[in-house]
Image: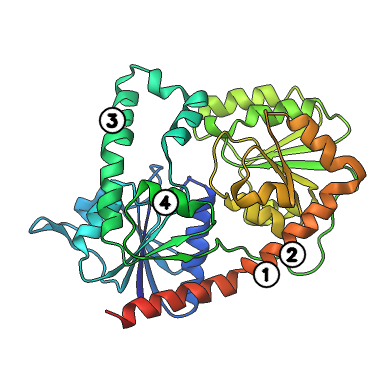
Protein backbone atom coordinates (compact mmCIF):
# COMPACT_ATOMS: atom_id res chain seq x y z
CA UNK A 1 0.00 0.00 0.00
CA UNK A 2 0.93 3.63 -0.44
CA UNK A 3 0.55 5.44 2.88
CA UNK A 4 1.04 9.13 3.52
CA UNK A 5 1.29 10.55 7.04
CA UNK A 6 0.49 14.22 7.57
CA UNK A 7 1.84 15.61 10.82
CA UNK A 8 3.11 18.76 12.48
CA UNK A 9 6.30 17.04 13.66
CA UNK A 10 8.64 14.13 13.02
CA UNK A 11 11.34 12.87 15.39
CA UNK A 12 14.32 14.30 13.50
CA UNK A 13 15.98 17.47 12.22
CA UNK A 14 16.36 19.10 15.64
CA UNK A 15 12.78 18.67 16.93
CA UNK A 16 12.06 15.75 19.24
CA UNK A 17 8.65 15.02 20.74
CA UNK A 18 6.80 11.87 21.73
CA UNK A 19 4.18 12.16 19.00
CA UNK A 20 6.81 12.65 16.31
CA UNK A 21 8.73 9.69 17.72
CA UNK A 22 5.65 7.47 17.44
CA UNK A 23 5.05 8.63 13.87
CA UNK A 24 8.61 7.73 12.94
CA UNK A 25 8.50 4.28 14.56
CA UNK A 26 5.17 3.34 12.95
CA UNK A 27 6.38 4.54 9.55
CA UNK A 28 9.61 2.59 9.89
CA UNK A 29 7.72 -0.60 10.70
CA UNK A 30 5.36 -0.15 7.74
CA UNK A 31 8.36 0.25 5.43
CA UNK A 32 9.83 -3.00 6.82
CA UNK A 33 6.61 -4.73 5.82
CA UNK A 34 6.89 -3.56 2.22
CA UNK A 35 4.63 -0.51 2.24
CA UNK A 36 5.53 2.82 0.65
CA UNK A 37 5.46 5.58 3.27
CA UNK A 38 5.64 9.32 2.69
CA UNK A 39 5.43 11.94 5.43
CA UNK A 40 4.36 15.55 4.93
CA UNK A 41 5.41 17.56 7.95
CA UNK A 42 5.59 21.16 9.09
CA UNK A 43 9.30 21.83 9.68
CA UNK A 44 10.13 23.05 13.19
CA UNK A 45 13.86 23.58 12.66
CA UNK A 46 15.93 25.16 9.93
CA UNK A 47 17.99 22.01 9.41
CA UNK A 48 15.03 20.11 7.94
CA UNK A 49 15.58 19.88 4.15
CA UNK A 50 12.71 20.18 1.64
CA UNK A 51 12.92 16.43 0.97
CA UNK A 52 14.70 13.81 3.07
CA UNK A 53 14.97 10.06 3.44
CA UNK A 54 14.34 8.77 6.96
CA UNK A 55 14.15 5.07 7.89
CA UNK A 56 12.96 4.23 4.37
CA UNK A 57 10.33 6.99 4.36
CA UNK A 58 10.36 10.11 2.21
CA UNK A 59 9.78 13.21 4.35
CA UNK A 60 8.58 16.43 2.73
CA UNK A 61 8.87 19.80 4.47
CA UNK A 62 5.54 21.55 4.04
CA UNK A 63 6.61 25.17 4.32
CA UNK A 64 8.77 24.63 1.23
CA UNK A 65 5.79 23.31 -0.70
CA UNK A 66 6.25 25.65 -3.65
CA UNK A 67 9.58 23.95 -4.33
CA UNK A 68 8.44 20.47 -3.41
CA UNK A 69 4.99 19.99 -4.88
CA UNK A 70 4.28 23.07 -7.05
CA UNK A 71 0.78 24.30 -7.71
CA UNK A 72 -1.41 22.90 -10.46
CA UNK A 73 -4.89 24.39 -10.89
CA UNK A 74 -4.94 25.46 -7.27
CA UNK A 75 -4.04 22.00 -5.96
CA UNK A 76 -0.86 20.44 -4.69
CA UNK A 77 0.82 17.63 -6.56
CA UNK A 78 1.10 15.16 -3.72
CA UNK A 79 2.61 11.68 -3.67
CA UNK A 80 0.01 9.12 -4.75
CA UNK A 81 -1.49 7.49 -1.67
CA UNK A 82 -4.09 4.85 -0.89
CA UNK A 83 -4.24 6.02 2.73
CA UNK A 84 -3.80 9.53 4.06
CA UNK A 85 -3.41 9.50 7.84
CA UNK A 86 -3.78 12.89 9.50
CA UNK A 87 -1.98 12.99 12.86
CA UNK A 88 -3.24 16.48 13.77
CA UNK A 89 -6.52 17.63 12.19
CA UNK A 90 -6.19 21.19 13.49
CA UNK A 91 -3.49 22.34 11.11
CA UNK A 92 -3.51 24.14 7.79
CA UNK A 93 -1.34 21.39 6.34
CA UNK A 94 -4.03 18.79 7.19
CA UNK A 95 -6.74 20.87 5.56
CA UNK A 96 -4.80 21.48 2.33
CA UNK A 97 -3.71 17.86 1.96
CA UNK A 98 -7.25 16.61 2.61
CA UNK A 99 -8.63 18.90 -0.09
CA UNK A 100 -5.95 17.83 -2.55
CA UNK A 101 -6.52 14.08 -2.14
CA UNK A 102 -10.24 13.36 -2.70
CA UNK A 103 -9.61 9.87 -4.08
CA UNK A 104 -7.57 8.62 -1.10
CA UNK A 105 -9.00 7.15 2.08
CA UNK A 106 -8.53 9.46 5.05
CA UNK A 107 -7.91 8.50 8.67
CA UNK A 108 -7.76 11.14 11.40
CA UNK A 109 -5.74 10.26 14.50
CA UNK A 110 -7.08 12.26 17.46
CA UNK A 111 -4.70 11.97 20.38
CA UNK A 112 -5.14 15.21 22.31
CA UNK A 113 -8.19 17.32 21.39
CA UNK A 114 -8.30 20.61 23.29
CA UNK A 115 -11.49 22.07 24.74
CA UNK A 116 -11.90 25.45 26.45
CA UNK A 117 -10.69 24.10 29.79
CA UNK A 118 -7.51 22.77 28.21
CA UNK A 119 -6.72 26.22 26.81
CA UNK A 120 -7.33 27.76 30.23
CA UNK A 121 -5.04 25.23 31.91
CA UNK A 122 -2.18 25.86 29.49
CA UNK A 123 -2.64 29.62 29.76
CA UNK A 124 -1.87 29.43 33.49
CA UNK A 125 1.77 28.75 32.60
CA UNK A 126 2.19 30.30 29.16
CA UNK A 127 0.27 33.58 29.68
CA UNK A 128 0.09 34.17 25.93
CA UNK A 129 -3.60 35.02 25.94
CA UNK A 130 -2.91 38.17 27.97
CA UNK A 131 0.01 39.23 25.81
CA UNK A 132 -0.30 42.07 23.28
CA UNK A 133 2.75 40.88 21.36
CA UNK A 134 1.61 40.78 17.69
CA UNK A 135 2.84 37.20 17.32
CA UNK A 136 0.87 36.06 20.38
CA UNK A 137 -2.24 37.93 19.22
CA UNK A 138 -2.01 36.24 15.82
CA UNK A 139 -1.55 32.84 17.48
CA UNK A 140 -4.63 33.40 19.65
CA UNK A 141 -6.69 34.30 16.59
CA UNK A 142 -5.52 31.13 14.84
CA UNK A 143 -6.20 28.91 17.84
CA UNK A 144 -9.62 30.41 18.62
CA UNK A 145 -11.05 31.07 15.16
CA UNK A 146 -9.12 29.32 12.40
CA UNK A 147 -7.97 26.06 13.98
CA UNK A 148 -11.47 24.76 14.95
CA UNK A 149 -12.83 25.44 11.46
CA UNK A 150 -9.93 23.67 9.78
CA UNK A 151 -10.38 20.67 12.05
CA UNK A 152 -14.08 20.42 11.27
CA UNK A 153 -13.40 20.42 7.52
CA UNK A 154 -10.72 17.74 7.86
CA UNK A 155 -12.86 15.60 10.15
CA UNK A 156 -15.90 15.88 7.86
CA UNK A 157 -13.89 14.16 5.09
CA UNK A 158 -12.54 11.34 7.27
CA UNK A 159 -13.30 7.70 6.51
CA UNK A 160 -12.22 6.55 10.00
CA UNK A 161 -10.85 7.91 13.26
CA UNK A 162 -8.15 6.50 15.51
CA UNK A 163 -8.22 7.19 19.24
CA UNK A 164 -5.84 5.83 21.87
CA UNK A 165 -7.71 6.29 25.14
CA UNK A 166 -11.36 5.78 26.06
CA UNK A 167 -11.71 9.16 27.78
CA UNK A 168 -11.14 10.83 24.40
CA UNK A 169 -14.35 9.54 22.80
CA UNK A 170 -16.90 11.76 24.59
CA UNK A 171 -14.51 14.68 24.27
CA UNK A 172 -14.10 14.09 20.53
CA UNK A 173 -17.86 13.84 20.04
CA UNK A 174 -18.50 17.05 21.96
CA UNK A 175 -15.92 18.98 19.91
CA UNK A 176 -16.46 17.49 16.45
CA UNK A 177 -19.25 16.04 14.36
CA UNK A 178 -17.98 12.49 13.82
CA UNK A 179 -19.57 10.69 10.88
CA UNK A 180 -17.18 7.76 10.47
CA UNK A 181 -16.10 4.76 12.55
CA UNK A 182 -13.95 5.36 15.63
CA UNK A 183 -11.30 2.67 16.08
CA UNK A 184 -9.28 2.18 19.27
CA UNK A 185 -5.68 2.31 18.09
CA UNK A 186 -3.24 2.25 21.01
CA UNK A 187 0.06 4.04 20.71
CA UNK A 188 2.76 1.40 20.34
CA UNK A 189 5.94 0.69 22.27
CA UNK A 190 8.94 -1.55 21.79
CA UNK A 191 9.12 -3.89 24.78
CA UNK A 192 12.71 -4.36 26.08
CA UNK A 193 14.08 -7.84 25.62
CA UNK A 194 15.40 -9.51 28.74
CA UNK A 195 15.33 -8.36 32.37
CA UNK A 196 15.34 -4.74 33.49
CA UNK A 197 17.95 -3.85 36.12
CA UNK A 198 16.85 -1.06 38.45
CA UNK A 199 19.37 1.16 40.22
CA UNK A 200 20.14 0.20 43.84
CA UNK A 201 19.49 3.80 44.97
CA UNK A 202 16.06 5.47 44.43
CA UNK A 203 16.16 6.98 40.95
CA UNK A 204 13.55 9.36 39.53
CA UNK A 205 13.50 10.64 35.96
CA UNK A 206 11.80 13.30 33.84
CA UNK A 207 11.17 12.70 30.12
CA UNK A 208 9.79 15.65 28.14
CA UNK A 209 10.70 18.80 26.30
CA UNK A 210 11.50 21.64 28.66
CA UNK A 211 8.69 23.84 27.36
CA UNK A 212 6.66 26.03 29.72
CA UNK A 213 3.68 23.68 29.77
CA UNK A 214 5.90 20.79 30.98
CA UNK A 215 7.09 22.71 34.09
CA UNK A 216 10.50 21.10 34.44
CA UNK A 217 11.26 23.59 37.24
CA UNK A 218 8.71 21.71 39.39
CA UNK A 219 10.79 18.55 38.90
CA UNK A 220 13.87 20.49 40.01
CA UNK A 221 12.06 21.52 43.21
CA UNK A 222 11.15 17.90 43.86
CA UNK A 223 14.77 16.84 43.47
CA UNK A 224 15.89 19.43 46.02
CA UNK A 225 13.50 17.99 48.59
CA UNK A 226 14.61 14.36 48.20
CA UNK A 227 18.43 14.39 48.63
CA UNK A 228 18.35 10.65 49.32
CA UNK A 229 17.34 9.95 45.69
CA UNK A 230 18.97 10.50 42.30
CA UNK A 231 17.06 12.64 39.78
CA UNK A 232 17.61 12.69 36.02
CA UNK A 233 15.96 15.34 33.84
CA UNK A 234 16.12 14.23 30.20
CA UNK A 235 15.30 16.73 27.48
CA UNK A 236 15.97 20.35 26.67
CA UNK A 237 14.20 23.58 25.84
CA UNK A 238 14.02 24.56 22.18
CA UNK A 239 14.50 28.16 23.31
CA UNK A 240 18.26 28.29 23.88
CA UNK A 241 18.11 31.11 26.43
CA UNK A 242 15.40 29.35 28.41
CA UNK A 243 17.42 26.13 28.28
CA UNK A 244 20.44 27.97 29.68
CA UNK A 245 18.38 29.41 32.53
CA UNK A 246 16.95 26.01 33.43
CA UNK A 247 20.40 24.43 33.48
CA UNK A 248 21.81 27.19 35.62
CA UNK A 249 18.98 26.63 38.11
CA UNK A 250 19.39 22.84 38.04
CA UNK A 251 23.17 22.99 38.52
CA UNK A 252 22.61 24.10 42.13
CA UNK A 253 20.95 20.77 42.99
CA UNK A 254 23.66 18.16 43.69
CA UNK A 255 21.48 15.06 43.16
CA UNK A 256 20.12 16.24 39.79
CA UNK A 257 21.64 15.17 36.45
CA UNK A 258 20.71 16.97 33.22
CA UNK A 259 22.01 14.92 30.28
CA UNK A 260 20.12 16.99 27.69
CA UNK A 261 18.77 15.33 24.58
CA UNK A 262 19.60 11.62 24.74
CA UNK A 263 19.69 8.90 22.12
CA UNK A 264 17.10 6.13 22.14
CA UNK A 265 19.64 3.77 23.70
CA UNK A 266 20.52 6.28 26.43
CA UNK A 267 16.84 6.96 27.12
CA UNK A 268 16.14 3.25 27.43
CA UNK A 269 19.08 2.83 29.83
CA UNK A 270 17.83 5.67 32.04
CA UNK A 271 14.26 4.35 32.08
CA UNK A 272 15.46 0.83 32.86
CA UNK A 273 17.33 1.97 35.97
CA UNK A 274 14.69 4.49 37.12
CA UNK A 275 12.12 3.64 39.75
CA UNK A 276 9.68 6.46 38.95
CA UNK A 277 9.04 8.62 35.89
CA UNK A 278 7.61 12.02 36.85
CA UNK A 279 5.46 14.15 34.54
CA UNK A 280 4.84 17.67 35.89
CA UNK A 281 2.98 19.01 32.84
CA UNK A 282 -0.08 21.21 33.31
CA UNK A 283 -1.75 19.42 30.37
CA UNK A 284 -1.32 16.09 28.57
CA UNK A 285 -3.27 13.58 26.55
CA UNK A 286 -1.93 10.08 27.17
CA UNK A 287 1.79 10.78 26.59
CA UNK A 288 4.04 8.37 24.76
CA UNK A 289 6.46 8.85 27.65
CA UNK A 290 3.98 7.06 29.95
CA UNK A 291 3.89 4.06 27.63
CA UNK A 292 7.69 3.94 27.18
CA UNK A 293 8.26 4.22 30.94
CA UNK A 294 5.80 1.43 31.72
CA UNK A 295 7.59 -0.78 29.19
CA UNK A 296 10.67 -0.37 31.40
CA UNK A 297 8.74 -1.10 34.60
CA UNK A 298 8.79 2.49 35.89
CA UNK A 299 5.97 3.72 38.10
CA UNK A 300 4.28 6.87 36.73
CA UNK A 301 3.71 10.00 38.78
CA UNK A 302 1.79 12.86 37.18
CA UNK A 303 -0.84 15.52 37.68
CA UNK A 304 -2.92 14.12 34.83
CA UNK A 305 -4.77 10.80 34.89
CA UNK A 306 -5.99 9.81 31.39
CA UNK A 307 -8.08 6.60 31.55
CA UNK A 308 -6.84 6.25 35.16
CA UNK A 309 -3.44 5.33 33.72
CA UNK A 310 -1.48 7.26 36.33
CA UNK A 311 -3.45 5.99 39.32
CA UNK A 312 -3.38 2.40 38.06
CA UNK A 313 0.33 2.32 37.30
CA UNK A 314 1.73 4.90 39.68
CA UNK A 315 0.44 7.87 41.65
CA UNK A 316 -1.97 10.56 40.46
CA UNK A 317 -0.92 13.86 42.05
CA UNK A 318 -3.60 16.34 43.07
CA UNK A 319 -3.11 19.94 44.18
CA UNK A 320 0.46 19.87 42.81
CA UNK A 321 1.65 17.81 45.81
CA UNK A 322 4.38 15.81 44.08
CA UNK A 323 6.31 15.47 47.35
CA UNK A 324 3.56 13.39 48.96
CA UNK A 325 3.16 11.37 45.77
CA UNK A 326 6.84 10.45 45.62
CA UNK A 327 6.92 9.57 49.32
CA UNK A 328 3.97 7.26 48.73
CA UNK A 329 5.62 5.47 45.79
CA UNK A 330 9.00 5.07 47.48
CA UNK A 331 7.41 3.81 50.70
CA UNK A 332 7.12 0.02 50.99
CA UNK A 333 8.42 -0.29 47.39
CA UNK A 334 4.99 0.63 45.99
CA UNK A 335 6.79 1.92 42.87
CA UNK A 336 7.79 -1.65 42.06
CA UNK A 337 4.25 -3.05 42.26
CA UNK A 338 2.90 -0.20 40.13
CA UNK A 339 5.73 -0.50 37.61
CA UNK A 340 5.13 -4.23 37.15
CA UNK A 341 1.40 -3.62 36.63
CA UNK A 342 2.15 -1.00 33.96
CA UNK A 343 4.58 -3.34 32.23
CA UNK A 344 1.98 -6.12 32.08
CA UNK A 345 -0.57 -3.70 30.60
CA UNK A 346 1.58 -2.30 27.80
CA UNK A 347 2.94 -5.74 26.92
CA UNK A 348 -0.62 -7.02 26.45
CA UNK A 349 -2.18 -4.04 24.65
CA UNK A 350 0.54 -1.84 23.12
CA UNK A 351 3.34 -4.08 21.87
CA UNK A 352 4.70 -2.60 18.64
CA UNK A 353 4.23 -5.48 16.20
CA UNK A 354 0.65 -6.21 17.20
CA UNK A 355 -0.32 -2.51 16.95
CA UNK A 356 1.27 -2.18 13.51
CA UNK A 357 -0.60 -5.26 12.27
CA UNK A 358 -3.86 -3.86 13.64
CA UNK A 359 -3.17 -0.60 11.82
CA UNK A 360 -2.53 -2.43 8.54
CA UNK A 361 -5.79 -4.37 8.88
CA UNK A 362 -7.72 -1.08 9.11
CA UNK A 363 -5.87 0.32 6.09
CA UNK A 364 -6.66 -2.82 4.05
CA UNK A 365 -10.35 -2.72 5.00
CA UNK A 366 -10.68 0.91 3.93
CA UNK A 367 -8.85 0.40 0.63
CA UNK A 368 -10.95 -2.70 -0.12
CA UNK A 369 -14.13 -0.63 0.33
CA UNK A 370 -13.01 2.08 -2.09
For disc 3, the marked residue is: 141
Say which element carries label 4.
Answer: helix
How far apart are labels 2 and 1 at the CA level? 6 Å
Give the mark, 3 or 1, whose residue is nearer the N terminus: 3
For disc 1, the marked residue is: 348
Q: In the current view of this chain or complex, which residue is farthest to the left?
A: 73
Residue 296 drawn at (x, y percent): 74, 57
Q: Nearer the viewer, mark 4 or mark 1?
A: 4
Q: Residues within 10 Å of mark 3 (few under 14, many from 20)?
A: few
Say which element carries label 3.
Answer: helix
- Quarter holding the N terminus is bottom left
Does residue 234 appear left or right of residue 160 in this picture? Answer: right
Q: Residues within 10 Å of mark 1 (few under 14, many from 20)?
A: few
Q: Is residue 158 visible?
A: yes
Count of marks placed on residues: 4
Give the mark, 3 or 4, whose residue is nearer the N terminus: 3
Give the mark, 2 or 4, whose residue is nearer the N terminus: 4
How far apart are labels 2 and 4 at the CA level? 28 Å
Say which element carries label 2.
Answer: helix
Is there a contact, CB below 8 Å, between mark 3 and mark 2?
Answer: no
> Which mark, by number, is residue 344?
2
Say which element carries label 1.
Answer: helix
Q: Nearer the viewer, mark 2 or mark 4?
A: 4
Please name whichever residue, 122 or 23, is drawn nearer the observer in this view of the structure. Answer: 122
For disc 4, the marked residue is: 172
To which quarter of the image does residue 318 belong? Answer: top right
Amino acid sequence: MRICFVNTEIFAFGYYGGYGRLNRVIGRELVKRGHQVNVIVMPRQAEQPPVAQLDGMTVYGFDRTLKTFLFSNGKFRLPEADIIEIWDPNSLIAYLVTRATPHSKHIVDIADPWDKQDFKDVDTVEHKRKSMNPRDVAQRFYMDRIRPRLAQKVIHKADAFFYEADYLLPKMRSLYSLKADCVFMPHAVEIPAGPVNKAPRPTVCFLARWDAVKRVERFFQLAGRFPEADFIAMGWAHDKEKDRQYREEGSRIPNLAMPGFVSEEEKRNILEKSWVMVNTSIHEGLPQSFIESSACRCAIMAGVNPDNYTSNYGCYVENDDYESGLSYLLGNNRWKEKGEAGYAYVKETRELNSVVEKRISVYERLVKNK
